Image (cartoon, rainbow, N blue to C red):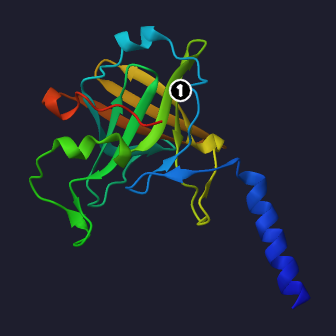
Amino acid sequence: MVRLTIYFVIVFLLQSCFCLFEAESTEFGQARKKQANKYNFDVKLLQKIDTLSLYEELLYYETNGKILERYINHGKSFLRFYNNGKFSYFTRVGYDEKKFKSIPNYRLTRSDFNPLKSEQGYYYSDGNELFIKIITWSPGITLGIICETKKIIQNLTIKGDTIVLSEDYGKNYYSKDYYVKRKVDKELLIGWKPDW
């Protein structure tokens, strides 16, 4: 009994070492951390990023120089940037939660891009480099606590209408996610404001 108690105390302390804040969540279960945009947002970034378009994930990532398919019938993912250094990361758009598969020929709707349904993010510059930071639930922790980790800070590269997000994990292991600009009816995006 004493060992079991010690075990739970150690596990709780280890979790608290990695977690920096308690989070609220939206009505759609997305984590939220209310904070001022403390990142170095430069309005010149708006010359490179279109805030009235979506950037659709190409569903491939690159690791050790190989391109692998990551997408397995889980709907589509989009980045939507706002003009204040914030962005939304929408996942599982056009996914049927009851049938556990993508909806064929799904047509995007305005409600798909409600910021309350997205993961919370920031984009910013540091010198000549661009970064994004996503605030999300930490895997395995179910007590309403989320963590900010270096893993969710990614380099952002803009090449024409393509955005590349990359992470370097060390030891020649890295990943790259490719997003392509997709023109959509502006009515889907106009009027939405991030809630963080």
- The part of the image, by quadrant, that contains residue 56 is top left
**Apparent side of residue 154 relative to residue 6 in the rendered image (left or right):** left
Q: Nearer the viewer, residue 31 or 176?
A: 31
Q: Tell me if residue 192 comes above or below residue 71 in the rendering.
A: above
Q: Which residue is denoted by mark 1 in the rendering?
A: 131
Which type of secondary structure does the marked residue at label 1 adopt? strand
Q: Tell me if residue 139 comes above or below residue 113 in the rendering.
A: below
Identity of the residue drawn at 59% across and 33% down = 35
Identity of the residue drawn at 43% across and 57% down = 29
Q: Residues within 10 Å of mark 1 (few under 14, many from 20)?
A: some
Identity of the residue drawn at 65% across and 44% down = 149
Horizontal and vertical percent position of residue 70: 37, 54
> Outermost residue toward the right?
2
- The part of the image, by quadrant, that contains residue 47 is top left
> Outermost residue toward the bottom?
1
Horizontal and vertical percent position of residue 6: 88, 78
